[in-house]
Amino acid sequence: MKRNIALTGFMGSGKSAVGKVLAGRLGRRFVELDDVIEEIAGKSIPDIFRQDGEITFRELEIEATRRVSKGTDLVIACGGGIVLNMINIDRLRETSRIVYLTASPGVILRRTRADDNERPLLDVPAPAERIRELLRFRRPFYERAADLRISTSRLSTGFVAERIISQLKEDEGFNL
């Protein structure tokens, strides 16, 4: 029986915000996978990208996913690129229901500009085009990995969390 909830989706889709609310409502521990990566590396995500490159970051992501997927009763906010490596998805599937949070490119751009997080993949002259380009490439990976899919573009974090809970209550293979 699966006991974890793994939130996937592009940056700015609401994984962290929804994950915190969801964990609170379910009385579960919230885990930000990027925090685990930073702990393993001993440096920030932007520093990993700048100093070591994306390949090293993806290797660290695999190790962080391995560690976190062994936990129970977790709500896990995964990085936007976690779906690019099937090893990560296979590990998450062992103990988690995977929820794909979607948002429109415009909403993603607005949210990523409004937060304080440094976004190495959007540090380009045309971030809106970069978002559309990455979404086009990643969408099939997100969809293939997902057990549930929810658009967050026009919904509050609380409403998204309630929708996830409602759908998981109907899931006989999940222990809520």
Image (cartoon, helix red, strand yellow):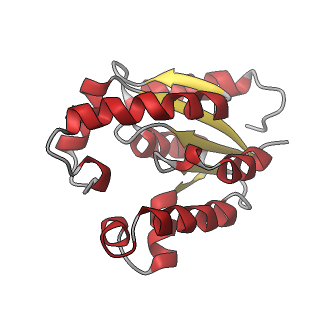
Query: 132 or 43, which lies in front?
Result: 132
Q: Residue at x 43, y 81 (%)?
A: 42
Outermost residue toward the bottom in this view: 42
Quarter that holds the C terminus: top right
How far from the left and from the top, in percent, is residue 153? 35, 22
Is residue 40 something one can see in this rendering?
A: yes
**Residue 12 sits in which quadrant?**
top left
Number of labels in the image equals 0
Query: 43 or 57, which lies in front?
Result: 57
How far from the left and from the top, in percent, is residue 85? 62, 50
Is residue 13 something one can see in this rendering?
A: no
Vertical position of residue 43 compared to residue 13: above or below: below
Q: Residue at x 47, y 26 (%)?
A: 160
Q: Residue at x 64, y 42 (%)?
A: 5
Quick check: 170 left or right of 110?
Answer: right
Q: Residue at x 46, y 33 (%)?
A: 137
Quarter that holds the N terminus: top right
Vertical position of residue 104 compared to residue 47: above or below: above
How far from the left and from the top, in percent, is residue 47? 31, 72
**Residue 134 sits in which quadrant?**
top left
How far from the left and from the top, in percent, is residue 138? 49, 35
